Image (cartoon, rainbow, N blue to C red):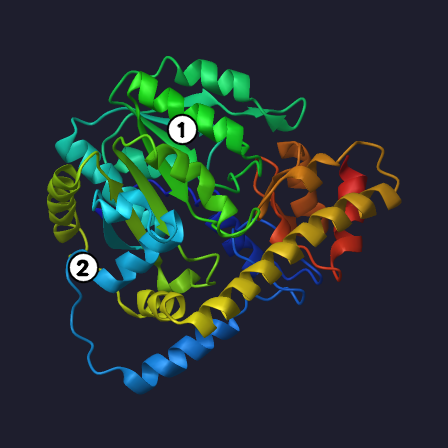
Amino acid sequence: MFEQLDVAPPDAILGLSEAFQKDPTPGKINLSVGVYKDADGKTPVLSVVKEAERRLLAEEATKSYLGIDGSAAYGASVQELVFGAGHEAVTSRRCAVVQTPGGTGALRVAADFLKAKLGGPTVWMSDPTWANHGSVFAAAGLTCQTYPYYDHASHSLDFEGMTEALREVPAGDVVLLHGCCHNPTGMDPDLSQWKALAALSAERGWIPLVDFAYQGFAEGLEADALGAREFVATGREMFICSSFSKNFGLYNERVGALLIVGASEDGAQKALGHVKRVIRANYSNPPAHGALIVRTTLADAELRVQWEAEVTGMRDRINEMRRLFVETLKAKGVTRDFSFISRQRGMFSFSGLTPEQVKRLRDEYAIYIVGSGRINVAGMTRGNMDRLCEAVASVL
């Protein structure tokens, strides 16, 4: 039977990384997959993670299963990080948390719940959005539509087009929003725009689903959560999918959470019961180790300070690479205005490069970029910047 199958196309992003690994070209550069790189081009293990693991190794007493919804202590730590200490959604108990295998796992759990218990509403995604979003929701049997988000001409957020479209989204449908560091554009709403979007959701009755994968990588851990909190403040039902792949560097530990925010404690607990049934039929219960690292770090004052400093260091390095990229392109004689890249936030930039230019960068210079022109700025270093900018200048 298997021989009769068509050959599956490679993943749009991970497939590029596979091709990069096979490329023998010296000095090759991978700006495709969304992982943080340090100044040496390595994806490091954070020092705070090493210390948390040292403590866990000394104290660990069991490898028994977690519950279906994971560790309650981990869930409490995630709530406090996302909402802030003493937030109304926590004290009123109208938020329930399940631990998931990464942010992608949280998205899929939410999607399965929407299909099974809320009638399979349409999911509205920004145009563009992360390449895997549509696949996750389609795999759960949901229909996806898009709303305008990015103005390619001005390299900015098309807030007017976005709100005009969201005003027409039917009540009960789901609107997917990026909590910060929009992937792939790097353009986020400001706080006043977040407030307007939250008010619009309450007025029109659509359900917000916030993909919150980069907390701490835009403006800071607290500032980056303000957009999601505006929706919570409306008192309505919503979902937040949180990930610790980036801000803890726990990519292969798959550490995430789905926060289910209800209008009341009763509603949140009823939804939690059905979400647990979805999880039980999928992966049964989540892995423990990565979540223990996060819980241990967030619960210890000393480790928390150390972690926040490391997140700040990663954010500052990314912003430094943005500025250096713009400056180096100018120094190489590029006359096109790339200053918008300095205004974008997070690991990604929508560069404006065409698919043809992206192909030339790969074929002629062994520089790997997603076909849409999305660049992982965190893959840039002072060591590869000259070669990168010379290549970009040559294909423009």
Kindly identify which residue carries mark 2: 285
Residue 67 percent across, percent down from the top left: 15, 62
Q: Which of 285 and 356 is in front in this view?
A: 285
Q: Alpha carbon of mark 1 to alpha carbon of mark 2: how far? A: 28 Å
Q: Is residue 357 left or right of residue 93?
A: right
| Quarter of the rendering occupied by the C terminus | top right
Q: Which mark is residue 125?
A: 1
User: Which residue is found at the position 47% from the left and 34% from the top?
Assistant: 129
Label pair 1/2, CB-CB below 8 angstroms:
no
Q: Nearer the viewer, residue 230 or 78?
A: 230
Q: Which amino acid does label 2 sit on?
A: Asn
Q: Label 2: state its secondary structure.
A: loop
User: Which residue is found at the position 76% from the left and 54% from the top?
Assistant: 385
Residue extending farthest bottom: 58
How crowded is the residue under tag 2: few (<14 C-alpha within 10 Å), some, or many (20+)? many
Above or below: residue 29 compared with residue 3: below
Q: Label 1: state its secondary structure.
A: strand
Q: Quadrant of residue 198?
A: top left
Q: Nearer the viewer, residue 388 or 199?
A: 199
User: Which residue is found at the position 45% from the left and 44% from the top?
Assistant: 225
Of pointers 1 and 2, the one earlier in the residue sequence: 1
User: Which residue is found at the position 47% from the left and 30% from the top?
Assistant: 194
Q: Which amino acid does label 1 sit on?
A: Met
Residue 114 percent across, percent down from the top left: 21, 33
Q: In this view, does 357 lie to the left or right of 16?
A: right
Residue 179 percent across, percent down from the top left: 45, 40
Above or below: residue 63 compared with residue 347: below
Residue 64 percent across, percent down from the top left: 16, 74
Count of numbered marks: 2
